[in-house]
Image (tube, rainbow, N blue to C red):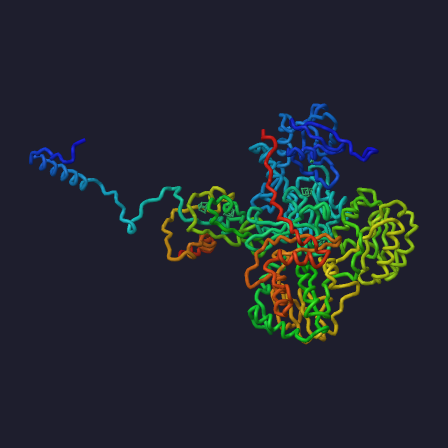
């Protein structure tokens, strides 16, 4: 509770002789992190409520009863003295580890968690050096597929309940549960059904042992085989931060990378599992002209011949994860020789450009009321959906939904759902101003395009009007990864894309919207793979995937985030911006002869105000080094 | 220390004869002693029981491979000359007991220093260093020993070891 003057009262305590001052209510585990003292935990997770299930975090606290206590459930108090290295605490932790290992199969050599497993690490740092247990261990059939993407190994489970709590608290999906009691408990999916949630992959990261592992990258690599970079997800406009892992120039897995401004350490299953295209053996690696392999030079000539004179009958379809840099190049082309060409963006909404002061994702945490209009957020913006759930269930925001159908968010018992007829969301929003749930601000209004069923211009006006009347702010929920960047560059607008009638089409990525127009007499495809929707193109150019290209995306709140490629494409593969610049030079566009991406980014920052952040790309983050500290083993 | 310019003292010729006899005696004595030279390559000297030479990948008696593709040997190898790529056993394609096997197993014999750490690290005693030490070859590529070269013959099928 803040004091009247707004300051949060603090508490000073001593942990292993280090004084630390933290806000009142902080848990001892969190306070210990401030002085870099490791208290091992299994069940505690900083984004979920503590439960004290595993007893791994035992410490000695004085004043207090003369027995070990759990650091993950005990809040700090003034003058408290915590000892993690007293004989009592050290042997308590070692004893708990001995219990954890009593039934553990110790199949580390075949376990995908091996090498990055807290149970291994804690046993080395806090456990007894040898085992005294030779009783029979409990056995289960294994591995059990929980879904197409996740395998469960019950023998390895330490029953920390992180996975089930995640499903209850964070996603509200409640697809996992613990069956039986006490030492007989085991994790199972509800009614033995396969997991269907789009958020299921996070339990792989959450599980502190190898009980929940990915079936997509099963046995692909060991942690020490892989190089990694911190990058950004390319699947939707939320822009979650991810870590990309590489082995032998293949992208082997994608994991979350916590950024509290956006994702709070969660990513959805699209971001986690839909990365395999870039590894496909049938990937396009060499340009082709009329089905024959060609040099870039020949392919470019053929492309220029094909689009020559097309004028406003030229159509350019762009993939959803086009980078800001490529958008800037396209903008230059459309200002110059390709003026009048029509542009379509794959998988986008028909929402107009955002207004001035749009809401940020983190602002949802302070909202007192959240209005969701014409969007199934679980599908459109998955991780924003989790942020809404957190604001509603943990921070006490009220939830108002305007949508024709039953949604994922309706599982909140107190959610108020106004069912409009499809296409009439604007009218429903206009009636909300006096709604009792919106009397206390700040109000956050999140609105989508109803998957094309709403008139977005009218809805934009209605939302803006509501925002002024209730004193709230709004956030348009774009879907395509860099939709907001494309709007900023003026390449698309609030009307649905249509390339019908175009005679020459350049198709960067899967065709938008949906297919190559029948009127096209010349088609150039620039993609990783030749897809059935592409038909039989005249020119084929190889493109790069998001894990190997330089550049940046603008997410749905307008934040520019940079990619850090983990793969190194081999010639003749080329960066997208290089190809576009060469095209520009061949079309005699001035100022497209950039010597490197930094020069291009500075030019883009000068030319387009929303791209100003491109002028100062951040240094790649230093890779975190694991810290080995904490008390010696007994 | 004698001055270099100083002439050696004149010696008795009998002393020279005695030295000759001594040399001949040593020679004749050696002729009588047993021969210790090995006529390599026609003859080979015995290897110590724990000699560390060319690697083998072992099998169980039922023919299944021991190696579970855990990569611990590759992690232990101080020169990084082992490559393991693992894959999952299935019902119709069972290579080793358990869930995991090595789809690719390669050792670069040019880099290997025959330290035996791989053998030490292996949790299932799959990789062992054998007594064979004649590993010379004519091109670098041929020093990459692949899994089919390293595997023991299958007792169930009695295939010969591939020796190139
Ligand atoms: S499966 Fe993993 S996360 Fe779930 S209870 Fe077991 S150890 Fe914990
Ligand atoms: S919510 Fe969007 S950005 Fe985040 S992980 Fe899923 S697809 Fe990627
Ligand atoms: S013997 Fe030593 S150097 Fe050779 S493969 Fe084994 S661990 Fe590596
Ligand atoms: S040889 Fe042994 S250590 Fe190496 S991968 Fe196979 S089982 Fe693991
Ligand atoms: S971490 Fe404290 S009881 Fe599990």
x then y, percent, for residue A435:
91, 50
Determine whether A460 is above or below A369 in the image. Answer: below
Asked whether the viewer can see residue B9, the reply is yes
Q: Position of residue A252 (x, y in %)?
A: 60, 53
Q: Position of residue A605 (x, y in %)?
A: 68, 56
**Left or right, A197 with reference to A210:** right
Q: Nearer the viewer, residue A469 or A489?
A: A489
Residue A1 visible in the shown view: no
Residue A326: which quarter of the image?
bottom right
Quadrant where the C terminus of chain A sits is: top right
Q: Residue furthest left?
A: B13
Note whether B75 is above or below A330 in the view shown: above
Which corner quadrant of the image does residue A406 belong to? bottom right
Quarter holding residue A12: top right
Task: Say which of B84 and A527 sits in front.
Answer: A527
* Quadrant including the N terminus of chain A: top right
Residue A435 located left or right of residue A374: right
Spot occupied by residue A254 in the image (x, y as percentages of width and height)? 64, 51
Q: Against A457, is B111 above or below?
A: above
Tag count: 0
Q: Nearer the viewer, residue A114 or A392?
A: A392
In percent of the image, x 50 and y 45: which residue is there?
Answer: B73
């Amino acid at each position: 509770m803040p004091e009247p003057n707004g300051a949060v009262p603090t508490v000073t305590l001593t942990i292993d002789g280090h004084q630390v001052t933290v806000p009142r209510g902080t848990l001892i585990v969190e306070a210990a992190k401030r002085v870099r003292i490791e208290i091992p935990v299994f069940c505690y997770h900083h984004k979920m409520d503590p439960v004290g299930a595993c007893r791994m975090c035992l410490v000695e606290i004085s004043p207090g009863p003369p027995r070990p206590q759990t650091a993950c459930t005990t809040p700090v108090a003034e003058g408290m003295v915590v000892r993690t290295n007293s004989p009592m605490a050290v042997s308590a932790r070692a004893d708990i580890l001995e219990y954890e290992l009593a039934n553990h199969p110790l199949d580390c050599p075949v376990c995908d968690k091996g090498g990055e497993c807290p149970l291994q690490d804690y046993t080395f740092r806090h456990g007894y050096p040898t085992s005294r247990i030779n009783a029979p261990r409990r056995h289960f059939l294994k591995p059990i597929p929980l879904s197409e993407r996740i395998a469960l190994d019950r023998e390895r489970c330490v029953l920390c309940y992180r996975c089930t709590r995640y499903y209850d608290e964070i996603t509200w999906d409640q697809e996992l549960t613990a069956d039986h009691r006490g030492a007989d408990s085991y994790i199972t999916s509800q009614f033995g059904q396969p997991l269907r949630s789009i958020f299921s992959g996070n339990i792989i990261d959450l599980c502190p042992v190898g009980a929940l592992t990915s079936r997509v990258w099963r046995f692909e690599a060991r942690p020490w085989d892989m190089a990694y970079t911190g990058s950004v997800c390319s699947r939707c406009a939320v822009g979650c931060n991810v870590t990309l892992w590489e082995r032998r120039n293949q992208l082997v897995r994608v994991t979350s990378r916590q950024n509290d401004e956006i994702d709070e350490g969660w990513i959805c299953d699209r971001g986690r599992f839909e990365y395999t295209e870039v590894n496909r053996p049938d990937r396009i690696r060499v340009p082709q002209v009329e089905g024959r392999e060609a040099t870039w030079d020949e392919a470019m000539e053929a492309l220029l011949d094909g689009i020559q004179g097309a004028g406003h009958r030229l159509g350019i379809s762009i993939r959803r994860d086009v980078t800001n840099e490529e958008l800037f190049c396209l903008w230059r082309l459309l200002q110059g020789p390709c003026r009048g060409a029509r542009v379509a963006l794959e998988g986008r909404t028909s929402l107009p450009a955002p207004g001035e002061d749009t809401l940020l994702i983190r602002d949802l945490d302070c909202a007192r009321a959240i209005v969701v209009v014409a969007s199934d957020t679980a599908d459109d913006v998955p991780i924003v959906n989790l942020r809404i759930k957190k604001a509603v269930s943990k921070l006490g925001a009220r939830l108002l939904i305007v949508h024709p159908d039953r949604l994922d968010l309706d599982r909140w018992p107190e959610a108020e759902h106004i069912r409009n007829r499809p296409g009439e969301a604007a009218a429903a929003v206009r009636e909300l101003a006096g709604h009792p749930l919106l009397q206390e601000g700040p109000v956050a209004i999140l609105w989508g395009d109803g998957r094309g069923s709403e008139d977005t211009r009218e809805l934009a006006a209605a939302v803006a009007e509501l925002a002024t009347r209730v004193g709230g702010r709004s956030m348009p929920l774009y879907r395509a990864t860099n939709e907001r960047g494309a709007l900023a560059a003026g390449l698309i607008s609030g009307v649905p894309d249509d390339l019908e009638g175009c005679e020459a089409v350049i198709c960067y990525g899967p065709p938008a919207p949906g297919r190559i127009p029948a009127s096209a007499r010349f088609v150039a495809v620039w993609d990783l793979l030749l897809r059935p929707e592409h038909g039989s193109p005249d020119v084929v150019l190889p493109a790069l995937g998001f894990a190997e290209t330089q550049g940046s995306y603008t997410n749905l709140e307008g934040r520019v985030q940079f990619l850090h490629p983990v793969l190194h494409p081999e010639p003749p593969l080329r960066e997208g911006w290089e190809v576009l610049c060469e095209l520009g030079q061949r079309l005699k566009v001035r100022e497209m002869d950039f010597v490197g991406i930094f020069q291009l980014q500075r030019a883009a920052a000068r030319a387009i105000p929303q791209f100003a952040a491109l002028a100062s790309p951040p240094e790649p983050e230093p890779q975190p080094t694991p810290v080995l500290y904490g008390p010696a083993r007994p | 220390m004698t001055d270099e310019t100083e002439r050696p003292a004149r010696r008795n010729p009998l002393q020279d004869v005695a030295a000759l006899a001594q040399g001949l005696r040593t020679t004749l004595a050696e002729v009588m002693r047993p021969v210790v030279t090995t006529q390599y390559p026609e003859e080979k000297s015995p290897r110590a029981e724990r000699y560390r030479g060319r690697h083998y990948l072992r099998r169980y008696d039922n023919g299944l491979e021991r190696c579970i593709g855990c990569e611990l040997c590759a992690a232990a190898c101080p020169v990084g000359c082992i490559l393991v790529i693992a894959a999952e056993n299935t019902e119709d394609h069972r290579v080793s007991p358990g869930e995991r096997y090595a789809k690719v197993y390669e050792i670069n014999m040019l880099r290997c220093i025959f330290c035996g750490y791989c053998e030490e690290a292996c949790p299932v005693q799959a990789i062992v260093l054998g007594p064979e030490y004649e590993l010379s070859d004519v091109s670098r590529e041929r020093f990459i020993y692949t899994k089919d070269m390293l595997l023991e013959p299958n007792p169930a099928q009695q295939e010969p070891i591939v020796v190139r």
